[in-house]
Amino acid sequence: MASDAKPRVKVPKTAAAGETITIKTLISHKMESGQRKDGDGNLIPRSIINRFTCEFNGELVVDVEMHPAISTNPYFQFDAIVPEAGEFKFTWYDDDGDVYGTTKKIAIG
């Protein structure tokens, strides 16, 4: 488990119904490709975030598959249409089976 993995998300607190908003996400994670060796010559196990998803009120908005070439601390910015008040759910999946997540609510105003 990447104990230092920390998800961060920026979502507006309010939007008009049908408005397109910009969402910014970043997770602090020391990606490890599995190809480097430690000081004793042993391979360091692969540990990368391999998938990121975003849902709004249970409906999939974004689903991204990542591979070893992805950089440390992956950052994504994307637009989403907000049809109603609700909650965005953000989930990052690690190679070792760990899942990191956070949620953000948005109101119609």
Image (tube, rainbow, N blue to C red):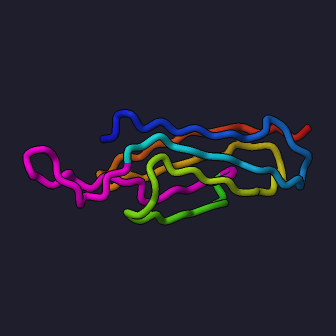
Q: Residue at x 67, y 53 (%)?
A: 77
Q: Which residues are magenta?
A: 31-57
Q: Residue at x 31, y 58 (%)?
A: 33
Residue in front for this viewpoint, 85 or 22: 22
Image quadrant containing the N terminus = top left
Per the picture, the main secondary structure of the magenta-coloured stretch is loop
Hey, which residue is sitting farthest left in the picture? 40
- The image quarter containing residue 26 is top right
- The image quarter containing residue 20 is bottom right
Image quadrant containing the C terminus = top right
Residue in front for this viewpoint, 32 or 103: 32
Hey, which residue is sitting farthest front in the picture? 39
Q: Is residue 11 above or below residue 37?
A: above
Q: Residue at x 37, y 63 (%)?
A: 68
Residue in front for this viewpoint, 99 or 43: 43
Q: Residue 4 in the image: state x and y as whole percent.
A: 39, 34
Residue in front for this viewpoint, 44 or 22: 44
51 part of magenta stretch: yes
Q: Is residue 19 above or below residue 103?
A: below
Q: Residue at x 10, y 52 (%)?
A: 42
98 part of magenta stretch: no
Q: Residue 32 in the image: state x and y as whole percent.
A: 31, 52
> In this rendering, would 39 be left or right of 93?
left
Q: Residue 53 in the image: state x and y as whole percent.
A: 55, 56
